[in-house]
């Protein structure tokens, strides 16, 4: 599901002429080989990492990867912390929380932002309004 489904969706999007592709990954995608995280979680992260590698190799889509922290059911605040970057080589796992509502709001905001194509973002709860967070992370040239 976490590896094959995104690949199938990318194939279908390309065949249908859809250019924009958003992928929800994990804040810990770079920690898949950390022996302290447990085999079940490591398997999940390896699948997410494989899907990301497939996405990064695609040039027929305007993809954006979002790596949220630990998902919560708390109501969204509309404020987040967003950082940009490619998969880190660090095996240190992070467990910063972010509400599902805020993840959904960031995904909606990403849809119409061509300046986010070809980039990956880490998303956790924070104090910056979503649009301001997107503007800030992109203005830094990340």
Image: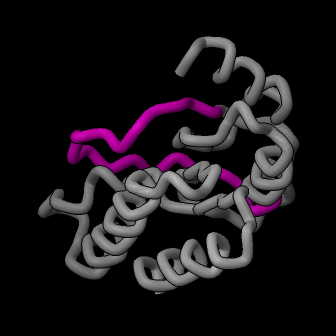
- Residue at the location (21% across, 47% down)? 91
Look at the image and say whether residue 124 sits in the magenta stretch. Answer: no
Look at the image and say whether residue 83 sits in the magenta stretch. Answer: yes
Q: Position of residue 38 (x, y in %)?
A: 22, 73
Its colouring scheme is one colour
- Residue at the location (46% across, 59% down)? 55
Q: Which residue, as the protein is rendered here, is positioned at the far left?
A: 35
Against 140, is 111 above or below? below
The segment highlighted magenta reads 82-101
- Residue at the location (85% across, 31% down)? 131
Against 125, is 84 above or below? above
Q: Main secondary structure of the magenta part?
A: loop
Quadrant in the picture for residue 82: top right
Q: Position of residue 136 (x, y in %)?
A: 71, 18
Quadrant in the picture for residue 104: bottom right
- The residue nearer to you, when weighing 139 against 45, is 139
Q: Which residue, as the protein is rendered here, is positioned at the far top?
A: 140
- The residue nearer to you, when weighing 51 against 58, is 58
For residue 69, side relative to residue 37 (left or right): right
For residue 136, side relative to residue 57 (left or right): right
Quadrant in the picture for residue 53: bottom left
For residue 101, side relative to residue 2 (left or right): right
Q: Position of residue 116 (x, y in %)?
A: 67, 37
Q: Position of residue 33 (x, y in %)?
A: 16, 60
- Residue at the location (63% across, 70% down)? 14
Total marks placed? 0
């Amino acid at each position: 599901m976490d590896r094959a489904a995104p690949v199938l969706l990318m194939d279908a999007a390309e065949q249908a002429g859809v250019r924009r592709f958003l992928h929800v990954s994990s804040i810990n995608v770079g920690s898949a080989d950390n022996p302290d995280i447990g085999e079940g979680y490591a398997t999940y992260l390896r699948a997410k990492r494989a899907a990301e590698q497939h996405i990064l190799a695609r040039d027929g889509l305007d993809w954006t990867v979002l790596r949220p922290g630990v998902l919560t059911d708390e109501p969204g605040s509309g404020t987040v912390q967003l950082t940009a970057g490619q998969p880190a080589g660090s095996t240190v796992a992070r467990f910063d929380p972010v509400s599902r509502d805020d993840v959904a709001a960031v995904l909606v905001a990403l849809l119409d932002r061509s300046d986010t194509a070809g980039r990956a973002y880490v998303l956790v709860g924070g104090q910056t309004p979503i649009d301001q967070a997107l503007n800030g992370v992109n203005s830094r040239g990340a």
